[in-house]
Image (tube, helix red, strand yellow):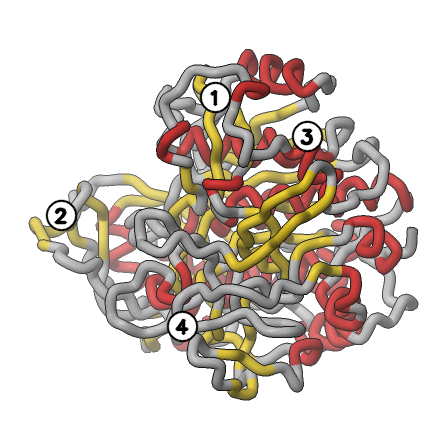
């Protein structure tokens, strides 16, 4: 059977990786195969109309999306036939998600996709890895767009930072440092419209850790709020598993729940737990977006990694999921990263974080905010001055083209020189992210002040849920509308995130700026 390398599937070993030998041929695994949508051009045309603000293009239901743009029966059957020929079982297929999940052994997957999976050692642990491309049958070229999950290296990191001086103090939320804020206080400072998100569902994507219900009750009681209804959703056998370490992944989970829940306490919160792999990440996102039971209208993601650490097939597959979200009126808010313009890559270059760099999401950057009572006294780019203290992520994608609503914009470097924006610019918007002026949260029984763009994504998600609850309709893809009316945001003009500086208008540090919630609501039709 003639085979071809799958475009964009090339993998390289992690830095300082050592192959320990072939992976156990009897080891069982599940792999997600992404299939082409049935009407790609039609979906592209719909998204272009959304980007131009055409109100006549309303959101599709999940069932309508699957019928109009999901994978075709013929394509799904072709993948099933290929799988069964190699002894692989079809665990799940979903036309709307354009995915087929296969189960089998390492030996079977090696044979099916022309690879040699290895047991690899790297700093911090081991993983099952591969190098080079995945091979697919020639007759499936163009049908199969990605094969994800063969390699199970950790794919993403959480984008939160703990205020060091507060990290281990056991305090009640009201006793935290004066420079910090509760989410409720930030909603006032940012003039969020009155509302509680009733009738909405906010989806949170988590790649580790968990929450303790007692912490949720204690935290919201301290704020004088009724705790939101929180549901854990298992993806790829992952589950709510708190570690007991507030500086670990529990910190991300609780930060997301507490910020989004404080902004929209009457909204249901669904927490999708998945393994921290490229397949787990994709499966969590597609599960949330296409969830016909909970029907989230907003998705918040506070995990990511430099574009250079992703395969092209993974980025394309994830972006395809975000295109579906836009078509179905689901707003996706994603943290832009906490390591400045380098995104933590040590090659001396500039990097942006994915999935925030997708043009079909609202990329959320970071500021440092000071208040005078209930008004903002100052707000600048978040930059702690050293890698340990963090800085808001931002820059220019090397993978995604310039979207129409960013045409004509410039970047400003740290020396003040301006250059035309050539590709997708990150972030779109921002809000308080500096851990020194951060969010008062409760994690594993410990009160602390957290920052990072991980807090900004659920803050914006809570705002969108609040607006949706007030209008009775989904705001959906809001980027084009925000770029069309930038006065709905507080323009940040001071500071830098390393290579890029703030400037009047959009910049690669804070995007259009932080929200004036009432004005953002007006754009959404309130």
Point out the frontmost of discs 3 and 1.
1
Cα–Cα span, label 3 and label 1:
16 Å
> Would you name the residue on which mark 3 appears?
262
Cα–Cα span, label 2 and label 4:
34 Å
Q: In the rendered image of this protein, does residue 83 appear above or below residue 28?
A: below
Q: Residues within 10 Å of mark 1 (few under 14, many from 20)?
A: many
* Element carrying mark 1: strand
Residue at image position (31%, 53%) is 387
Which of 388/148 is in front? 388
Residue 177 position, x and y percent, is 51, 28
Which of the marked residues, 3 or 2, is nearer the chain's N terminus? 2
Residue 423 position, x and y percent, is 53, 80
Q: Residues within 10 Å of mark 2 (few under 14, many from 20)?
A: some
Point out the frontmost of discs 1 and 2.
1
Q: In the rendered image of this protein, does residue 429 appear above or below residue 441?
A: below
Residue 173 position, x and y percent, is 56, 20
Q: Which mark is residue 499?
A: 4
> Would you name the residue on which mark 1 appears?
447
Dividing the image into 4 quarters, which one contains the N terminus? bottom left
Q: Are marks 3 and 2 in contact (CB under 8 Å)?
A: no
Cα–Cα span, label 1 and label 2:
36 Å
Which of the marked residues, 4 or 1, is nearer the chain's N terminus? 1
> Would you name the residue on which mark 2 appears?
121
Which of the marked residues, 1 or 2, is nearer the chain's N terminus? 2
* Element carrying mark 3: helix
Which of the marked residues, 3 or 1, is nearer the chain's N terminus? 3
Which of 85/125 is in front? 125
Which of 68/274 is in front? 274
Residue at image position (23%, 54%) is 129
* Element carrying mark 4: loop
Q: Residues within 10 Å of mark 3 (few under 14, many from 20)?
A: many
Q: Are marks 3 and 1 in contact (CB under 8 Å)?
A: no
């Amino acid at each position: 059977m003639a085979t071809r390398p799958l475009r964009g599937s090339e993998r390289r070993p992690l830095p300082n990786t050592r192959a320990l030998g072939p992976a156990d041929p009897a080891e069982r695994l599940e792999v997600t195969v992404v299939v082409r949508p049935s009407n790609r051009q039609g979906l592209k045309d719909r998204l272009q109309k959304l980007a131009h603000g055409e109100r006549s293009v309303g959101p599709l239901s999940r069932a309508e999306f699957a019928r109009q743009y999901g994978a075709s029966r013929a394509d799904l059957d072709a993948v099933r036939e290929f799988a069964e020929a190699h002894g692989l079982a079809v665990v799940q297929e979903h036309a709307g998600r354009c995915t087929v999940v296969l189960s089998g052994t390492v030996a079977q997957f090696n044979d099916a996709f022309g690879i040699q999976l290895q047991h690899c050692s790297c700093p911090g642990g081991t993983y099952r890895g591969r190098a080079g491309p995945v091979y697919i049958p020639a007759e499936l070229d163009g049908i199969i767009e990605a094969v994800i999950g063969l390699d199970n290296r950790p794919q993403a990191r959480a984008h939160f930072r703990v205020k060091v001086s507060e990290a281990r103090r056991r305090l009640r939320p009201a006793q935290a440092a004066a420079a910090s804020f509760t989410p409720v206080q930030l909603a006032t400072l940012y003039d969020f419209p009155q509302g509680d998100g009733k009738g909405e569902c906010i989806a949170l994507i988590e790649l580790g850790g968990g929450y303790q219900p007692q912490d949720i009750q204690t935290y919201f009681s301290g704020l004088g709020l009724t705790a939101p209804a929180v549901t854990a959703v298992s993806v790829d056998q992952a589950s709510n598993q708190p570690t007991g370490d507030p500086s670990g992944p529990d910190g991300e989970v609780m930060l997301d729940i507490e910020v989004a829940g404080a902004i929209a306490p009457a909204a249901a919160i669904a927490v999708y737990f998945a393994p921290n792999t490229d397949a787990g990440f994709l499966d969590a996102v597609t599960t949330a977006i296409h969830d016909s039971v909970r029907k989230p209208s907003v998705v918040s993601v506070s995990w990511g990694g430099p574009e250079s650490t992703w395969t092209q097939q993974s980025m394309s597959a994830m972006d395809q999921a975000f295109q579906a979200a836009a078509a179905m009126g689901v707003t996706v808010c994603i943290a832009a990263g906490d390591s400045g313009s380098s995104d933590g890559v040590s090659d001396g270059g500039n990097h942006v974080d994915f999935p925030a760099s997708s043009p079909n999401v609202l990329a959320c950057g970071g500021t440092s905010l000071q208040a005078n009572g209930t008004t903002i006294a100052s707000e600048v780019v978040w930059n702690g001055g050293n890698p340990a203290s963090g800085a808001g992520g931002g820059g220019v994608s090397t993978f995604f083209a310039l979207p129409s609503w960013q045409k004509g914009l410039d970047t400003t470097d740290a020396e003040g020189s301006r250059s035309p924006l050539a590709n997708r610019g990150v972030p779109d918007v921002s809000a308080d992210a500096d851990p020194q002026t951060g969010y008062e949260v409760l994690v594993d029984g410990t009160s602390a002040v957290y920052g990072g763009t991980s807090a900004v994504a659920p803050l914006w998600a809570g705002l969108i849920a609040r607006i949706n609850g007030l209008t009775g309709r989904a705001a959906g893809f809001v980027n084009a509308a925000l770029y069309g009316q930038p006065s709905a945001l507080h323009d940040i003009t001071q500071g830098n995130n390393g290579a890029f500086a703030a400037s009047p208008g959009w910049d690669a540090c804070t995007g259009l700026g932080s929200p004036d919630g009432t004005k953002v609501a007006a754009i959404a039709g309130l």
